[in-house]
Image (cartoon, rainbow, N blue to C red):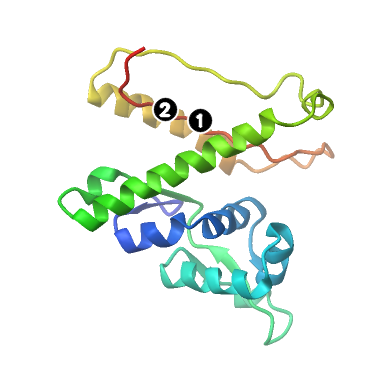
Amino acid sequence: MSEFQRAITDARVLAAMTHPVRRRLLDLLKLDGPSTASVLAEQTGEAVGNVSHHLRALAAAGLIEEAPELARDRRERWWRRIVPTLSWSSADFDGDASGEAIARAADSLNLDRQTGHVRRWADQPQDVQARWPLGPFSTEGWLRVTDEELAEFAAEITEVITRWSERSVPDDGRERATVFTFARAVPARP
């Protein structure tokens, strides 16, 4: 792992980050950078106290930290992600019954979150979708691979997504919207 990525191997940290509100806060801090509880509350529609509670839980799990240099006064608290990319593997929790249960729940919640983004797009009115005539896509394929080859494939896909998500956004005056992308590959039969 690099300074830009952290592998989650502690089930308590995985449980802390998969709470839906916390996951959304992590996403906002990654996408928009450091923020305060009140700004995040406005963006999520959550109460400021609830957001503050979840930010403290994320900090206790070592996923975010305070950014005191951004505060205008002693009362203002800014938060930032410690690393931009978090990952986990269910295999890291093998042999630990509670860890395995948390990893299964985290994977299920993550899939619900991912497909939820796609479903919300699919439910948008046609005039909204028409504003993006070239971009949104869906792709799929069937591969015949070994476990090692699948890991190589995953690394290539992850590299492309990471390169685009971590790039410096050009300052060319063009408006850029946020776009959610994800990829999954699992053993299956047609």
Quarter where residue 3 is shown: bottom left
- What crowding class fits label 1: few (fewer than 14 Cα within 10 Å), some (14-19), or many (20 or more)? few
Query: x, y (%) of residue 86?
Result: 43, 50
Q: Nearer the viewer, residue 112 or 154?
A: 112
Query: x, y (%) of residue 162?
Result: 51, 38
The tally of labels here is: 2
Query: x, y (%) of residue 186?
Result: 34, 26
Q: Identify residue type, mark 1.
A: Val
Image quadrant in which the C terminus is located: top left
**Kind of element beneath mark 1:** helix
Seen at 24% across and 26% down, the residue is: 148
Is residue 1 visible to us here? no
Side of 33 where 106 appears, left or right: left
**Image mark for residue 160:** 1
Quarter where residue 97 is shown: bottom left
Q: Please identify the residue farthest to the left as the structure is shown.
A: 95
In the picture of the structure, the residue carrying the numbered disc 2 is: 156
Is residue 18 visible to us here? yes
Side of 80 where 136 appears, left or right: right
Asked if disc 1 and disc 2 are in contact, CB closer than 8 Å, the reply is yes
Q: Identify residue type, mark 2.
A: Glu
Q: Please identify the residue farthest to the bottom as the structure is shown.
A: 74
**Kind of element beneath mark 2:** helix
Side of 91 where 116 appears, left or right: right
Seen at 23% across and 43% down, the residue is: 91
Q: Nearer the viewer, residue 74 or 142?
A: 142
Image position of 7 with respect to 69: above or below: above
Image position of 37 with respect to 84: above or below: below
Query: x, y (%) of residue 183?
Result: 47, 30
Q: Nearer the viewer, residue 134 or 54?
A: 54
Image position of 31 with respect to 114: above or below: below
The residues bearing labels 1 and 2 have C-alpha atoms spaced at a distance of 6 Å
